[in-house]
Image: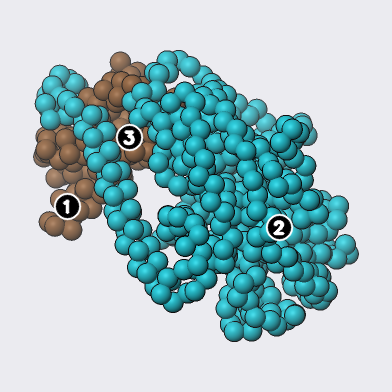
Amino acid sequence: MNRNEEYFSLLAQLKDASLPPALEDSVSRAQTRARRQSRRRKWETSLASLGGAAAAFALAVNLSAPFALACGKVPILKELAAAVATSPSMKAAIEHDYVQYVGQSQRENDVTVTLEYLILDRTQLNIFCTVIGPDSNESYFLNPGLSTPNGKQLEGYGVGGTNFTPGELGGFSATLDPDVTLPEELLLTLRVTAMKRTSDAPAIPLDTPAAAHYDVEPQIIATLTFPLTLDLCRIGPGRQMDIGRWTELDGQRLLVQSLDVDATQARLTVRFDPDNTRWCQHLNFYLLDAKGKQYKAGAWATDGSSYVSRGEDRASGQVVYYLESPYFDGVGPYTLCITGAEWLDKAEDKRLVHIDLTRGTATGLPEGVTLDRERCQPDGNSRRQLAFQVPDGVDYFSIFSYTYYDGAGEEHRFSSAWRSGHEEEGYQTHGFDLYDYPYDTIVLELSSTSSTRLEEPLEVPFG
Amino acid sequence: MEFARRCEALKPRLYRTALLYLGGKSQAVDAVDEAVYRAFLARKKLRQPEYFTTWLTRILMNVCAAELRRQKREQAMEELPETAQEDFDALPLRQVVERLPQDIRSVIVLRYFTGLTLAETAQALDIPPGTVSTRQRRGLALLRLELTDEEVEA
């Protein structure tokens, strides 16, 4: 038997071999294992948070008079403290009696939403609640809206929807315009959609186009309206510190204009010189008080991450950056410590990258970034990747915008981008996928043309 | 359940892939089991359902590679270098496949025993199609196989 005959014989043997019985129920075993893992994780988390919260609670009650006082007024505050554990500002607001207990429940279609607490300051309304419903639902999405008691939409606020795990306290935040007078009575309307557990989700035919899987508008399963009474007396006055100090970074001038401080967040207003040659796409910084306490950039977001601001407004040349608030314990004078920035060149020709797909060449890439020629080969089907290597240590939130121009000069947008890390090799790959692209050239638009990371922060003292 | 249905349909191919790649039946069963579990946990991250096969194959290959790394830590490496053509010639085909250098073995197993196309193999291994071609050519030479695409697809 020659090698080719041996190959076909081996292939036939393998194809005829029956599947080992141990693999027959691997999918249900995977489901059971995943459920067990999930329960254990929740149990460990709740034990850990319970233990941690209990210890912190005992300490806080014994050591902190405001916290003990706050807990005396609002029941079951430990759970709330755990929910905002990542934010020093929110924790401080709880300690300083900013929590208002709501305790309202409503039910529709077997879904029950219980509003537990709210934390209100001049610029932010944070609402905390739990959602429970049928076991077949894995998670819920609440889309909130605020209106006055007569049903008129409230002016001067912004709010986004949030995902909730059944039975777990979660929250969402409405940003309020500080110049708008908030009424004492409000209506909060929650439109609820659910994500089914995979085992209960209807099967999707295999020949369904990919886009159809994700473009389906989720069905609203409950619309619940809660009347809210806000205790406006608890809102402390905000503070504004005018700073008005010019500084220079990477040859670009910026005016650190003011710091607005409220209980749950602070906002730093920065204005950029219109004569700068580059737009600021991102600023890395923190605030330091006289006692050396740091306040990080970014404000508490309900999903445990931080709100950050990006990109200079090209019309006004101004950005308002969120940061943790020194409202309760900050001691002036303060120092703004700038640690880095991302820039985009204002000259249009410097913002465009011209790529010759046939030759595998690119002109106009930011320093250090290279075209990954090997990955840019067509795959023999309709797909072609555009991939770029970015060395580690070069700080880019994103290098490219989603806009590109085809070989005929027509403008398009990529529907998705990807990024993969290669820690051992010391670089990251950023890329896009092109489908059925008939041209030999493409022009990409950069989102940032340069970035800088300072070893020693650029300090702007004030206050 | 869509995930279960697609997994069931793909399982024989996954098992065949793991069996040739790892060499042992029990290791192959464990690898497929682990890959199905990891896929189940990550199922919502699959944005394009048409890539289910290459996606799950890629997860399996990662599981197999991790298992090989573990084995290599525990015992002497059994792969033969590409220069050991005489040793390859003396072994049955199945053993030669199992002793191919790992990068070449991945390509040969997926292309000639799992039945993936060149583009699918590139996607499953996250390497450029040109690299798949090169490794495929080197692998076929080491195996002394002369296979046309038509024969493979038949």
Instruction: Name the residue: 50% across, 67% down.
Output: A69
Which residue corresponds to the image point at 62% horizontal and 72% vertical from the top-left? A328
Residue type, numbered disc 2: Arg
For marks 3 and 2, give the CA distance: 45 Å
Verify CB contact (< 8 Å) between mark 1 and mark 3: no
Q: Residue furthest front?
A: A73
Q: Which chain is cyan?
A: A
Query: A304 and A351: which one is in front?
Result: A304
Residue found at x 72% / y 50%: A176
| Residue denoted by label 1 | B71
Q: Is residue A262 left or right of residue A194?
A: right
Q: Are labels 1 and 3 assigned to the same chain?
A: yes
Foreground of the two, A309 or B146? A309
Q: Nearer the viewer, residue A206 or A87?
A: A87
**Which disc, if any, is residue B148?**
none
**Residue shown at the point (68%, 41%) measured from the top left:** A186
- What residue is disc 3 on? B40
| Residue A202 location (% of width, % of height) | 40, 18
Q: Is residue A286 visible?
A: no
Give the labeled residue for mark 2.
A122
